Image (tube, rainbow, N blue to C red):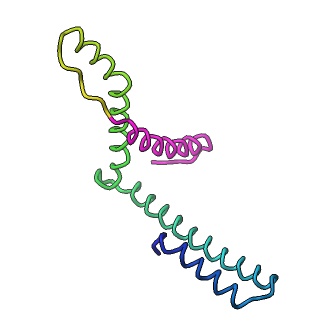
Amino acid sequence: MNPLLLGPLFELGKGIIDRMFPDPQKKAEAELELMKLAQSGDLQVILAQLAINAKEAESSSLFVAGWRPFIGWICGFGLLYATIMLSLLGWLSVARGWPLPPAVDTDTLLYVLGALLGIGGLRTIEKIKGVETK
């Protein structure tokens, strides 16, 4: 289900609960049941995404399993350029009288790299616990 629709649907559900159950105890029980349904739906979405990720990782095709490492290498090279190469090239450009090299927008780069490193941190925990991979 579209996650953008979940909020309004649950608000509608709460409105119906308010009308159907004037007793505060019954109302609280009905709201608890509604929250359980919301959480189980979210859990199902998360589990489905994890299953998709596992299938992608098992693939031997570079275009299926290789997109995450590709993004990682792009972010790594972008960070190398933005932090080290840009300074060295800028110094060399001034020394030689060349135009300055272009700067990189590091906001998007660091956002994506941070997400990838967070995922990489999970793999580090798996390695510490001894989880086997191929």
Which quarter of the picture shows residue 53? bottom left
- Magenta stretch: dominant SS? helix
Residue lying farthest to the bottom in this orientation: 20
Question: In percent of the image, x 49 and y 48: which residue is there?
Answer: 133
In the image shown, does 32 or 99 lie closer to the viewer?
A: 99
Q: Is residue 17 above or below residue 74?
A: below
Residue visible at 28% across and 17% down in the picture: 90
The vertical placement of 124 against 65, above or below, is above
Q: Is residue 56 left or right of residue 90?
A: right
In the depicted structure, whether residue 46 falls above or below residue 134: below
Check the image and report above or below for 113 versus 58: above
Q: How many marks?
A: 0
**Is residue 108 highlighted in magenta?**
yes
Give the quarter of the image for residue 74.
top left
The magenta span reads 105-134
Residue ID at (61%, 82%) = 13
Tell me residue 12's x, y (percent).
58, 82
Residue 123 colored magenta?
Answer: yes
Residue 128 vs residue 62: left or right?
right
Residue 91 drawn at (x, y percent): 29, 13
Q: Residue at x 31, y 16 (%)?
A: 88
Q: Is residue 21 left or right of residue 99?
A: right
Give percent across and percent down for residue 130: 59, 44
Q: Is residue 93 left or right of residue 29?
A: left
Q: What percent of the width, then of the height, locates residue 15?
A: 64, 83
